Image (cartoon, rainbow, N blue to C red):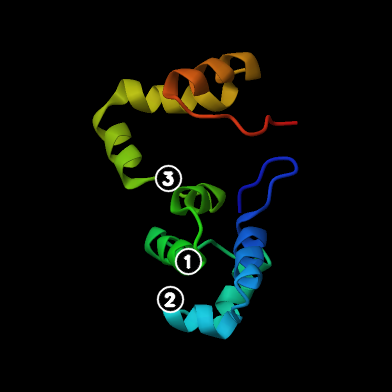
Amino acid sequence: MVSGAGEETFGQRIQRRRRDLRLTQRVVAADIGIDFTYLSKLENDRGEPPGERTVRRLAEILKDDSEELLALAGKIPLELRERASEDTDFAMLLRTLPKLPDDRMDKVYRAAGVQRRKRRP
């Protein structure tokens, strides 16, 4: 489950939000339609993160931002996957992004209108 330096993991985030709202694992799991033991594993960053639909439902129940939770879970939006499969240049751009130095990534973030929160270590 993805996390940068000093940033919460997916599991830490959903656990914190659930506790902030004073909800039990059983209540949240029942609302989503998963077993509470699976939710416990998610909160402890064990195993694979759930699918996009489950993450979105978690965000709804936990009153959190679904796009941020999806990003923390390492989920790539369907629209992005579809565009990459139809546009080779776009796919190549995505492949080069992890290799860019921070100063170039800052420019990409600015061009995309995304506020960069934290830099990689």
SS label for mark 2: helix
**Cα gap from disc 3 to disc 1, whole angstroms:** 17 Å
Q: Tag 1: Cα neighbours inside 10 Å, few (<14), some, or many (≥20)?
A: many
Q: Which circle, 2 or 3, is nearer the viewer?
A: 2
Residue 35 visible, this angle: no
Residue 70, image x and y in percent? 48, 52
Mark 1 sits on what residue? 58
- Tell me whether circle 1 and circle 2 mark residues in contact (CB < 8 Å): yes
Residue 15, image x and y in percent? 64, 67
First in residue order: circle 2 vs circle 3: 2
Residue at the spot x=54%, y=53% of the render? 73
Residue at the spot x=66%, y=64% of the render? 16
Q: Quadrant of residue 14?
A: bottom right
Against 62, is 24 above or below? below
In this rendering, would 41 be left or right of 92?
A: right
Image quadrant in which the C terminus is located: top right
- Tell me whether circle 2 and circle 3 mark residues in contact (CB < 8 Å): no
Q: Tag 2: Cα neighbours inside 10 Å, few (<14), some, or many (≥20)?
A: some
Mark 2 sits on what residue? 32
Amino acid beneath label 2? Ile
